[in-house]
């Protein structure tokens, strides 16, 4: 009786996650394109303030570091990573992405960009995190215990104690395997756009007159 009740209770939840994932997959690319268009429009409309660009580094650099640090620990689908940044938050890669996105919105002082990024997180990352947690719970028996010690997103200040015998170490091989250097390249290109794209487009438009 309890078993059938639990099954019937889990089914709607699984359907909810699956439906949301389908929606997220459909709108991910259009939403990303829209965000890029709005970002470039704001950049064309007004020059970024040097102070805002400088302050944005306080979010972007920690975000890059956190993503790179996490990429050197996580072994996707092979084991439940509970060391390194994963002893502070269960989703350091997504937290790093959020910090970077907030930083680039700050660099332009753009509320429309910030709003689009917030919507993107809600409709894309939320179902992805829910789906990944469902997979981890079904695959690794220790996942519920891990969840009881480590927050989903906002990090705890002190690292949670890993099970006896489990000692992780940062690996550059894993960092390269996950191609996390692409985030560094992308961030560098965005800063080049912030600093030089508006002037370059203005010079091009002036030359065409």
Image: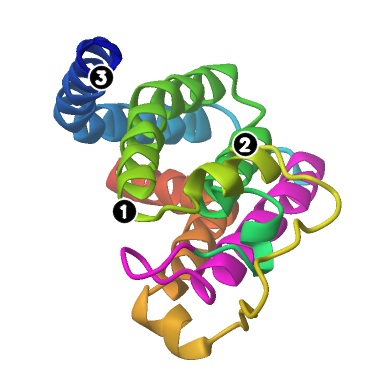
- Which of marks 3 and 1 precedes in the sequence? 3
- Which of marks 2 and 1 precedes in the sequence? 2
Q: Position of residue 96 (x, y in %)?
A: 59, 51
- Magenta span includes 70: yes
What residue is shown at x 64% (from left), y 39% (from top)?
148
Considering the numbered disc 1 on the image, is that residue within a helix, a strand or a loop?
helix
Q: Is residue 168 above or below residue 184?
A: below
Depth check: give the residue in front, 145 or 72.
Answer: 145
Q: Is residue 95 visible?
A: no
Q: Which residues are magenta?
A: 51-80
Q: Which residue is mark 2?
A: 102
Q: Is residue 65 left or right of residue 126?
A: right
Q: Position of residue 72 (x, y in %)?
A: 53, 77
Q: Which residue is mark 1?
A: 139
Q: Which residue is mark 3?
A: 3
Magenta portion: prevailing SS class: helix
Residue 32: image quadrant is top left
Label 3: how many Cα within 10 Å (few below 14, some 14–19, many 20+): few
Q: Is residue 36 left or right of residue 57?
A: left
What residue is shown at x 44% (from left), y 50% (from top)?
203
- Which of marks 2 and 3 precedes in the sequence? 3
Looking at this rendering, what residue extends furthest in the right direction? 158
Depth check: give the residue in front, 189 or 65.
Answer: 65
Quick check: marks 1 and 2 in contact, CB under 8 Å? Answer: no
């Amino acid at each position: 009786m309890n078993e059938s009740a639990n099954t019937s209770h889990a089914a709607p939840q699984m359907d909810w996650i699956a439906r949301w994932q389908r929606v997220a997959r459909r709108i991910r690319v259009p939403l990303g394109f829209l965000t890029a268009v709005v970002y470039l429009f704001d950049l064309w409309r007004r020059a970024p303030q040097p102070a805002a660009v400088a302050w944005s580094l306080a979010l972007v650099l920690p975000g890059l570091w956190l993503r790179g640090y996490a990429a050197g620990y996580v072994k996707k689908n092979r084991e439940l990573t509970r060391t390194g940044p994963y002893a502070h938050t269960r989703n350091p890669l997504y937290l790093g992405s959020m910090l970077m996105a907030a930083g680039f919105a700050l660099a332009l002082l753009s509320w429309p960009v910030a709003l689009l990024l917030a919507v993107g997180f809600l409709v894309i990352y939320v179902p992805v995190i829910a789906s990944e947690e469902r997979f981890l719970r079904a695959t690794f028996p220790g996942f519920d215990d891990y969840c009881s010690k480590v927050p989903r997103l906002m990090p705890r200040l002190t690292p949670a104690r890993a099970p006896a015998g489990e000692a992780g170490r940062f690996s550059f091989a894993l960092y390269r395997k996950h191609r996390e250097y692409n985030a560094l390249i992308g961030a560098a290109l965005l800063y080049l756009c912030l600093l030089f794209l508006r002037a370059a487009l203005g010079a091009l438009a002036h030359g065409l007159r």
